[in-house]
Each structure stands twice: as structure tokens, then as C-alpha cells.
Amino acid sequence: MKPVTILRTCAWMHARRAYLHLSAALERELKPCGLSPPQFMILADLAAHGPSPLSPLARRLGLERTTLYRTLRPLEADGLVEIIPRDRGRSRVARLRRAGQARLEQGIPAWIRFDHGTRTAFGPERWPALISTLAWLVEARGESAR
């Protein structure tokens, strides 16, 4: 196979470029709120699911555990999230604090602008197919990646 064909057809490369583009767009929207995209998603997940052990939280968000820990540190330092020991083991649980809920609510309009812009650019008729294809890809390939 020719390298030019690899570059034109590589799913990893195209997914990576799309990720970088979407991340930059969401980062611009969230910047005034003082949140990065992963921090915003952590707050949203904790608001949706309640307190969570860190490993399941990392899995749900598609983050490596070490990345989750690094991303949680500033949220904890800012009083947005509380990390508490779970039982007597080494496991810990993340819990959303009131200030974290308030910051999440501050970021939701930014996320809505990002989402609207992305849906508009992609096209409303193709949006459901994109989301279902991405979900299928994660489900089909996700377990083998870990």
C-alpha cells in the first residue's frame, strides 16, 4: 500500500484531526468559565451520575486514570470537586461540590454554543449518524484498546 493511500484512508489520523479541531473549538468556548473540556465533562458526569469511584469515572469519560487524576487536581484545589476515600481500601470517590455545580451551570451555555456550531457545520441530517457511528466504533473497538 502506498503511503499516500494510508494518509487518505487512515481512520486514526482522521479521528485524531477531528478530535483536535473539536477540542480547540470547545476549549475556546469554555475558556471564560475557567474550565478545560475534560474538566467540564468530569463536572457533567458527576452531576449526572453522582459520586463516582475514580476508575469507573475514567472509563465513562474515555480517560486514562493518570490523566483523570491530573485533571481532577485543579478541580479539587478550586473546591469544585471533593475526592474522598472509599471504605478502607485505596479506592477513592469523586463528588461534585456546590461550587462545581455552579461552575458546570456557568459552562453549559458555552457547551450549547459549541454543540450548536458543530451540529450546524456538520448538518442536522448527518448528525445522528455521526454520533451513532462514533458510539459504535468505541463499543466495537474500545474493549480491545485497553
Image (cartoon, rainbow, N blue to C red):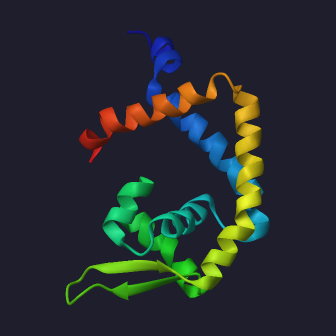
Residue lying at the far top of the rendered structure: 1
Residue 1 rendering spot, x and y as whole percentages: 38, 9
Q: 143 left or right of 101?
A: left
Q: Could you tell me which residue is drawn at 70 percent across and 44 percent down?
A: 115
Residue 120, image quadrant: top right
Residue 146 sits above or below residue 1 on the image: below
Q: In the figure, 33 relative to 142: above or below?
A: below
Of 143 and 7, nearer the camera is 143
Left or right: where 121 falls relative to 101? right
What is the total number of numbered labels drawn onto the structure image? 0
Residue at 71% over, 25% down: 123
- Work out which residue is located at the far bottom of the displayed protein and give it: 88
Q: How far from the left and from the top, in percent, is residue 47? A: 53, 69
Image location of residue 19, percent across then percent down: 57, 41
135 lies above or below 110: above
| Front residue of 5 and 38 | 38
Q: Residue at x 42, y 77 (%)?
A: 94
The residue that appears at 26% across and 48% down in the rendered structure is 146
Relative side of 113 to 23, left or right: right
Point out residue 3 in the picture as x, y percentages from the top left corner: 45, 15
